[in-house]
Structure formats: structure tokens, C-alpha cells
Image (cartoon, rainbow, N blue to C red):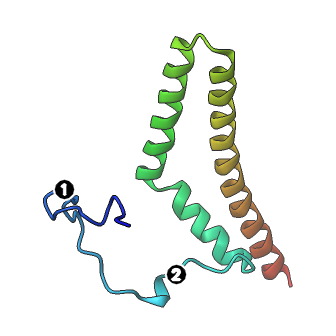
Amino acid sequence: MMWPWSNRTPLDRPEKVFDLPPYDPALEPPPLGDILRRGMAAQRLLGDPTLAEAFEAVRRDNYAAWLISDSMVECEILQREARALDRVAAKLRGYVGAAKLRATQDEAA
């Protein structure tokens, strides 16, 4: 049996855009159990202009699709997507807040 992707020629494959560095375990994300490191990572993500632009683009696309939609089901799906995006941002802000709280507790101790 031939898989559909097994007969692709190099011309159909997307060109490599980035030269990625070799794997470095030190660049792995912080463990979720470390509140301070997780908060710093969340703050870095929230301050990332590319992520902010992506969030804004998804919100804009959802709103535009909602305006032209005639289907209640599609409108509900778009509303759920928008809420999910807001929940991700809220979770990241929560990580930052927890890290700030832990840092003040550590300073007081």
C-alpha cells in the first residue's frame, strides 16, 4: 500500500524557511510546578508582539466571519473560539499573577 505522502517529489515539499539550531535541553520550557519560572515564561509570551498579533488576527477573523454568517451553529462555534482565546490569555495572566504573589511571599520570608 502506498501512502499519499510517500510519492511526493522534492518539488512539492515546502521549502525550509528557517535553519533551526540543534536540540538543546536547556531551551525547554520551564516545568509547570515551578511557579516563578512559569510566570516569567507567561510574561514573556504575553509581551511577545508576534503572539499578540496572532491573537488579534484570530479575533478579527472571527468577528468578520461572525458578521457574514447566517448559521446560528457557526456563530456559536465562532463565539466559543473567541472565548477559548480569551481563556488562554487569562490563564497566562494568572500564571504571571501567581508568580508575583510567590515572589512577594519569598521576599517576606
Q: Residue furthest bottom?
A: 25
Q: Amino acid at mark 1?
A: Asp
The correct choice, above or below, for 47 with respect to 7 in the image is above
The correct choice, above or below, for 90 with respect to 7 in the image is above
The correct choice, above or below, for 87 with respect to 105 in the image is above
Instruction: Point out which mark residue 71 bears.
Output: none
Secondary-structure class at tag 1: loop
- Can you give x and y, in whole percent of width and height, for residue 42 in the image? 61, 63
The correct choice, above or below, for 101 with respect to 23 in the image is above
Q: Categorize mark 1 by other alpha carbons within 10 Å: few (<14), some (14-19), many (20+).
A: few
- Can you give x and y, in whole percent of width and height, for residue 46 in the image? 55, 55
Rendered image quadrant of residue 41: bottom right
Tell me which residue sits at (34%, 58%) in the image.
4
Q: Residue furthest front?
A: 1
- Can you give x and y, in whole percent of width and height, for residue 18 in the image? 24, 67
Residue 35 located left or right of residue 46 = right
Instruction: Point out which mark residue 28 bears.
Output: 2
Q: Earlier in the sequence, mark 2 or mark 1?
A: 1
